[in-house]
Image: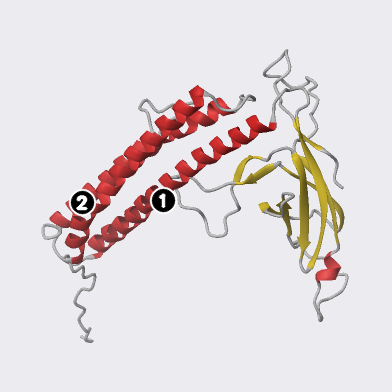
C-alpha cells in the first residue's frame, strides 16, 4: 500500500514574507498522496523494434482512482522520467466538471479537478501499455482540526451544486463562442466579396452589431477584459463572481455549510438564471434575424478573370 495521505491545512509561517537572495527557506514536503510505480519501456517494444534503443519520449502511465464501492472518481496521466522506479502524487481530489470559460475546451483536454475526496481508503490503478497494477492509499483529514464526516459530506454536496451551476452556464457561453466564430467567418467573407463597399455596408454593420451583443453578454458573465499589468479587479459585478462566492466561504469551513453559504448559493442560482435568460433571449430574438440577413447576402469572393494575350 502507498503511504497514508493527510489532507493537511497550510499557512505561511511567521516572519519574513518576501525573502531576498541569501535567506534560507526550507521546503515543505510536497502535498498529495505519494505514489510509487515502476516501468520498463523495453516491455512495450513490438517485434521489429530495436532492443536497447532508447526513446526520447516515454509512454505515459494512466492513473485511475477508485473509491471502495468500485466507482472511478479520478483519471490522470503521468510521463515516467526513466525506466525503473518513479514517483508521483495524487492531489486527493475527485474528477470535476468543466465550468464556464471564455475559451472552449481543447480536444483531449485533461480531466478537470474537482473537490477534495472524503477521508477513506482508495484504490489506485496504474496502466502502462497493456500492463497494469494497483495499490491502495488511505486518505485522512488533518488530525489537528476537528470535523465530522457529516460536515465534510455536506460541504462536498454544496461544492457539487456550485460546480453544476458553472457547468450549466458553460453550455450557454460555449454557444456564444460558437456564434462569435460564425460572425468572424462572415466578416472574412464580406472582406473577400467583390461587391462595392457601399453594397456591403448593411452586412458589415450587422456583423459589428451582433458581435458587440455577444461581447456584452460575455462581459456580463466574466467581466470586461483588462489588459493593464498588475492586480486588477472588475468594477462591475459578474455572474462568475456570484458563482465563486460560495467557494470562497467553503475554503475555510470545517463545520459544513451554514446560512451564509446557503444564501450565497441562492444568489448564485439567481445570477446564473438571469445570465442564461439573457443569452437565450439573444439566440431566440437577435440571432435568427442576423442569420437570415447573412443567408440572403450571397457572398461571392470570385471576380472575373481574363485571358492574357501575347502582344
Q: Is residue 26 left or right of residue 310?
A: right
Q: Is residue 65 left or right of residue 52?
A: left
Q: Which residue in the protein does label 2 denote?
A: 285
At horizontal 52% and vertical 48% (from top left) the residue drawn is 98
At horizontal 41% and vertical 45% (from top left) the residue drawn is 169
Which residue occupies the foreground of this view, 90 or 25? 90
Q: Quadrant of residue 125?
A: bottom right
* Residue 141: percent from left, percent from top: 74, 31
Q: What secondary structure is found at the residue carrying circle 2?
A: helix
Number of callouts: 2
Circle 2 Cα neighbour tier, 10 Å, few/some/many (<14 / 14–19 / ≥20): few
Q: Quadrant of the C terminus?
A: bottom left
Circle 1 Cα neighbour tier, 10 Å, few/some/many (<14 / 14–19 / ≥20): some
Tell me which colouring the rendered structure shows: secondary structure
Sooner in the amino-acid sequence: mark 2 or mark 1: 1
The disc label shown at residue 33, or none: none
Residue that extends furthest to the front in the rendered view of this protein: 150
The disc label shown at residue 171, or none: 1
Residue that extends furthest to the bottom in the rendered view of this protein: 310
Q: Is residue 259 left or right of residue 307?
A: right
Q: Tell me, yes or no, if residue 281 can be seen here.
A: yes
Q: Tell me, yes or no, if residue 223 can be seen here.
A: no
Which residue occupies the foreground of this view, 303 or 232? 232
* Residue 64: percent from left, percent from top: 72, 55
Q: What secondary structure is found at the residue carrying circle 1?
A: helix
Which residue occupies the foreground of this view, 192 or 163? 163
CA distance separating discs 2 and 1 = 19 Å
Amino acid at each position: 500500500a502507498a503511504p497514508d495521505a493527510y489532507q493537511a491545512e497550510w499557512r505561511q509561517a511567521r516572519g519574513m514574507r518576501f525573502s531576498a537572495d541569501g535567506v534560507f527557506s526550507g521546503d515543505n514536503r510536497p502535498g498529495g498522496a505519494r505514489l510509487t510505480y515502476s516501468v520498463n519501456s523495453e516491455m512495450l517494444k513490438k517485434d521489429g523494434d530495436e532492443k536497447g534503443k532508447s526513446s526520447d519520449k516515454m509512454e505515459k502511465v494512466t492513473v485511475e482512482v477508485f473509491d471502495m464501492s468500485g466507482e472511478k472518481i479520478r483519471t490522470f496521466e503521468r510521463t515516467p522520467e526513466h525506466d525503473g522506479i518513479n514517483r508521483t502524487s495524487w492531489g486527493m481530489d475527485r474528477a470535476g466538471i468543466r465550468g464556464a470559460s471564455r475559451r472552449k475546451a481543447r480536444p483531449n483536454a485533461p480531466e478537470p479537478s474537482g473537490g477534495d475526496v472524503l477521508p477513506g481508503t482508495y484504490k489506485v490503478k496504474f496502466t502502462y501499455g497493456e500492463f497494469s497494477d494497483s495499490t491502495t492509499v488511505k486518505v485522512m483529514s488533518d488530525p489537528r482540526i476537528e470535523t465530522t464526516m457529516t460536515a465534510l459530506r455536506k460541504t462536498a454536496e454544496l461544492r457539487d451544486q456550485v460546480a453544476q451551476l458553472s457547468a450549466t452556464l458553460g453550455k450557454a457561453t460555449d454557444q456564444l463562442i460558437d456564434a462569435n466564430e460564425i460572425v468572424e467567418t462572415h466578416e472574412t467573407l464580406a472582406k473577400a466579396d467583390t461587391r462595392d463597399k457601399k453594397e456591403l455596408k448593411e452586412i458589415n454593420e450587422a456583423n459589428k452589431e451582433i458581435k458587440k451583443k455577444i461581447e456584452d453578454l460575455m462581459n456580463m458573465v466574466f467581466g470586461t477584459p483588462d489588459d493593464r499589468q498588475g492586480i486588477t479587479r472588475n468594477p462591475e459585478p459578474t455572474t462568475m463572481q456570484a458563482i465563486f462566492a460560495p467557494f470562497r466561504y467553503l475554503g475555510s469551513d470545517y463545520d459544513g455549510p451554514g446560512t451564509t453559504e446557503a444564501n450565497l448559493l441562492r444568489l448564485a442560482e439567481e445570477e446564473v438564471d438571469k445570465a442564461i435568460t439573457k443569452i437565450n433571449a439573444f439566440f431566440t430574438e437577435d440571432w435568427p434575424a442576423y442569420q437570415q440577413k447573412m443567408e440572403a447576402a450571397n457572398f461571392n469572393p470570385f471576380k472575373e478573370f481574363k485571358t492574357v494575350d501575347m502582344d
